[in-house]
Image (tube, coloured by chain):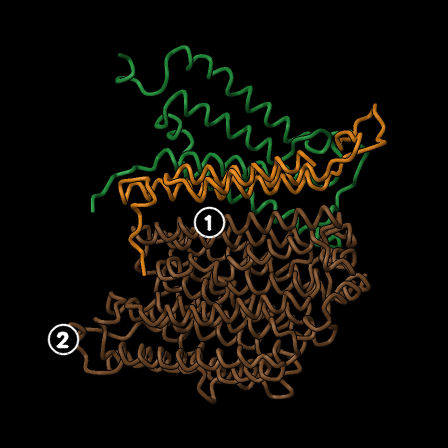
Amino acid sequence: MMIYLLTMVLFGVGIYGVLRQRNLIKMILGIIIAEHAVLLFFILVGYRLNGRAPILSPDAPITNMVDPLPQALVLTAIVIGLGTTALLIALAMRLYGKYGTYDIAKIRELRG
Amino acid sequence: MSKERTPGMSVIVKTVTRLTAWLIMLYGINIVLHGHVSPGGGFAGGVIIALSFIHLILAYGKEMVLKKLSEGLVEVFESTGALVFLGIALLGTTAGFFFKNFLPAGEPFHLFSAGTIPLSYIAISLKVWAGLFAIFVALVLLRIDKEQG
Amino acid sequence: MNQSAFLIPWFVVVPLAAAFVNSLIGGRIRGLPALLACLTTFSLLGLSLVATQFVRINTTLVYHVGGWKPPIGIAMVLDGFTVFMLVTVNLVAFAIAVYATDYMERYTSKAMFYSLLLLMLSGMNGVIVAGDLFNLFVFLEIAAVASYALVAFGTERHELEAAFKYAVMGTVGSLFILLGIVFLYSVTSTLNMADMSLMLAGQRDHNLILMVSVLFLMGFGLKAALVPFHAWLPDAHPSAPAPISAMLSGVLIKTLGVYALCRIFYNVIGFTPMLSAILMFLGTLSMVVGVLLAMGQRDLKRLLAYSSISQVGYVFLGIGLGTPLGIVGGVFHLFNHSVSKSLLFLNSGAVEYATGTRDLKVLGGLREKMPITGATSFLASMSIAGIPPFGGFWSKLLIIIAAVQAGYLGYALWAVIVSVLTLALFVTVFKDVFLGEPQHVWQGVKEVPGRMQVSMIVLALLSMVSGLLLLPDVKEAFLRPATAIFLEGTHYAQVILGDI
């Protein structure tokens, strides 16, 4: 129970970063932290008591295994996060080229 | 002193990189090919192969590496990987269902087993290493000319 | 498994293959990307019409990917509502692809544009046919990331700023959706939507299910631009190139937001009175906020973007009522708004192509110089504002009558007020842009090229005759199967799993 709460605290730290940071790069870091917290929570959900890793090997027979489905899905979600992060960083670098600053409070030309 | 004249890092780094880049790539290919026997597979192996190329850029500078491996070639690899993956999935259609595993399954823990899964891993690793390398090159080549106003 | 279900994977495979072929050889050959995009969207339109025919015969088709039976394997599902959304999405995509062949002449790297457009289309089709929650999430992310890149396509200052804000907010919304999926998995330990609804039956008021409902409402509400999650839309939609604005406002917010929300809330979790009250309240709030904020705008596309928020509120009001008449009204309004709002964005793109500005105070008197654009804009404005006999009138009437019948007189009154305000708004816009004396600056303005005119005329004809969809025979074929999916609710599970 404690470990699930700690994962949610990590998610909260990431969302706080998105909301309160003024530098573009630190906002992106906040998104990365929040995303990885959710994926960590997903893997922890799949834990079974006294289970071992879900890998077949010729010498040790499988008696009790943790859930393999979250591990496959988290791999997919990490790749999705990588793509999104790359796009966000490229956008941030281009924004620096156009506006001359990384401060989000100064990049406010679209209003109304 | 020497940094203004030659791009890249010092002589020691360049010498060691010449040896380790091939080792890293070989290790990545090993992880890709044994994806159905041990943990790893397409994505993890593809990332390691991309890292070996990025390692070369870090040590030698981007002009030298990009002369041998231009961005157009990397884009060709990327699209080819995706099309090969789709092709394998469509070939499964001829055997019944979309994405069906139609090659013989073989015995567990052997290298030539598990049907189409190793072929899919090779296609995925092509796409992943080309994609990661292209992202790195795009971010490195991005010229930030600051415009005022 | 039925033999005609072999149709389903092609909706995802065809645009994906076309996107990668385009990226491989499209840069070398002139004119190939545009031709490939038009052919692909035309074939997808044909496939979706064929799928309508199949669903009339079979009611529900399930496809087992790879031969593995659900709930162990991945399933792709084709039922009434799926087919309705497929026809809407592919029809609008075809019109936009034809329009974009002429409009994108002024931009560079056209091959990349068409690749991204086809990827976005493949992601949307994947969301519509997905049978389990994680596939829905993966295709949703594909479509969303492609749209972030497309909004930034012009790489000017405003477009980059709007794309960054859209990307950050969209990613946070996707994180909430992923968190909801994780919680649902921890309760039911399956990801197949039909299986999950069986496991969740009878647990609707459990605290965890309430929290998951709130998380999904936040996440999908952000994708659908429901107030108070709408803040990204007025910046992102005007900054994109005109075909992409039409695609985003016309089909993306409806597929990623409204369709996914309805599929999960009606078929997986189950429809409760509290959920109905929340959806109706948020829908009405969207309607009012959207139209009030639209009235003070000077930029043509920004005004249309705020009006999109308002009309999506109508759809949520209709669907949130839960009665058969309300659902028919909501779903029909979704189709009408897709066609009409896409046409309006294409018109604003044509105006910008010809004159170079979007400022309402500077434009004026373009009717003589651009007759086709003026006529189609008139038809689309009348359809959205709700004038008989155009399609928008019938759908709004259905929603208002359904609200009165269910006893919610307050919401019906707000719907009528917002409809009158929308009419005033669009009449003002039409007068400002097209009527009056042409100013001296616009003497040299010409009509837009041929292919843009063709796609605008096709969409205008559709928005005129879409009222005919309520005729008894046509309604049976098209609208009735869609609403049946809502009304059978969690019986969806028996239908899917019983088909194995």
Q: Is residue B137 above or below residue C54?
A: above
Counting from the top left corner in percent of width and height, residue C193 is at 71, 57
Q: Which label belongs to residue C440?
A: 2
Q: Colour of chain B?
A: green
Q: Quadrant of the C terminus of chain C?
A: bottom right
Q: How far apart in space, not on screen, are marks 1 and 2 (Cα)?
A: 45 Å
Residue B67 appearing in the image:
yes
Mark nearer the N terminus (1 vs 2): 1
Q: Is residue C176 above or below residue C277?
A: above
Q: Identify the chain drawn in brown.
A: C
Q: Nearer the viewer, residue A15 or B55?
A: A15
Q: Colour of chain A?
A: orange
Q: Nearer the viewer, residue B86 or A6?
A: A6
Q: Amino acid at mark 2?
A: His
Q: Amino acid at mark 1?
A: Ser
- Provide the secondary structure element on which disc 1 rests: helix
In terms of image quadrants, where is residue C88?
Answer: bottom right
Residue receiving disc 1: C23
Q: Is residue B33 left or right of residue B22?
A: right
